[in-house]
Image: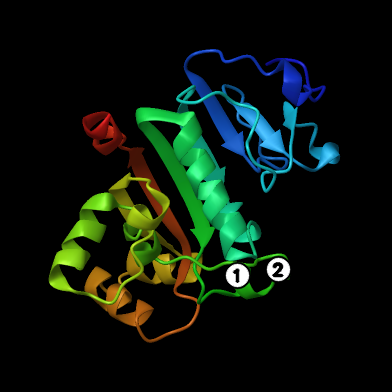
Amino acid sequence: MTDDTPVPASRVAPTPALKLSIGCGFHKHPEFINVDSFPDCNPDVLWDLERTPWPFEDDSVDEIVARHILEHLGQAPQTFFAIIKEIYRVVRHNGAVRVAVPHPLHTSFFSDPTHVRSFTKETFLMLSRRHNLNWRDQGKNVTLLALMLDVNFDPIDIHHLYDKPWRDKVARGEMTEDQLREAETSQFGVIRDVIALLRVDKSHRQQSS
């Protein structure tokens, strides 16, 4: 969309190959439909993401970018679960979900009072059906979110974005990559963000239908 005027939800057509940037804020993607609840951002779609269902058709989205938004959503677990299920509903099979969230052991997480939920690498694995089934078979005491919510986000890549002072130490040769990874387990503020690329897999639903 080229017009900055927010589009009412009723006018969002089920166009194929949509790309959504949810909770875009002022960081809008030119090739995406930018969604936010804050009018001053001039989003393409003005919408409260905690209000479900979203104004998009089933399997109508190729890609979702959720950059520093999920940590703001769903203080009540059931609200957060509804958002996860909504992402899964609108993204097509094999579509991509790209997430960036602050690491819970960084000041960027603690400094914002609107942050209501923390994430680690393991949080995203809880949304993978493959990992859930393995944990279930092994009798591990882990919350099986993918099975609970009937979703399946296949983790393609989950990694840490290290804070700049620590990245600079490695660049200057003051510490090795191994030492950096060791520091992240014992020191506050080493990891700034958790970055995840997830693939939406709906094959288990297709097999059961």
Residue drawn at (72%, 65%) of the image: 114
What secondary structure is found at the residue carrying circle 2? loop
The furthest residue to the right: 40
Across and down, in percent, residue 33 comes to 62, 25
Residue 115 location, quadrant = bottom right
Residue 37 location, quadrant = top right
Residue 175 in view: no
Image position of 10 (left or right of 120) = right
- Amino acid carrying label 2: it is Asp
The furthest residue to the front: 209
Across and down, in percent, residue 60 comes to 49, 22
Q: Image height check: is 159 above or below 3?
A: below
Looking at the rendering, in which quadrant would you find the C terminus? top left
Colour scheme of the rendered structure: rainbow
Question: Where does label 2 land, which residue?
Answer: 112
Q: Image height check: is 78 above or below 94?
A: below
What secondary structure is found at the residue carrying circle 1? helix
The furthest residue to the left: 138
Across and down, in percent, residue 51 comes to 70, 44
Looking at the rendering, in which quadrant would you find the N terminus? top right
Residue drawn at (49%, 52%) of the image: 100
Q: Residues within 10 Å of mark 2 (few under 14, many from 20)?
A: few
Question: Is there a contact, CB below 8 Å, between mark 2 and mark 1?
Answer: yes
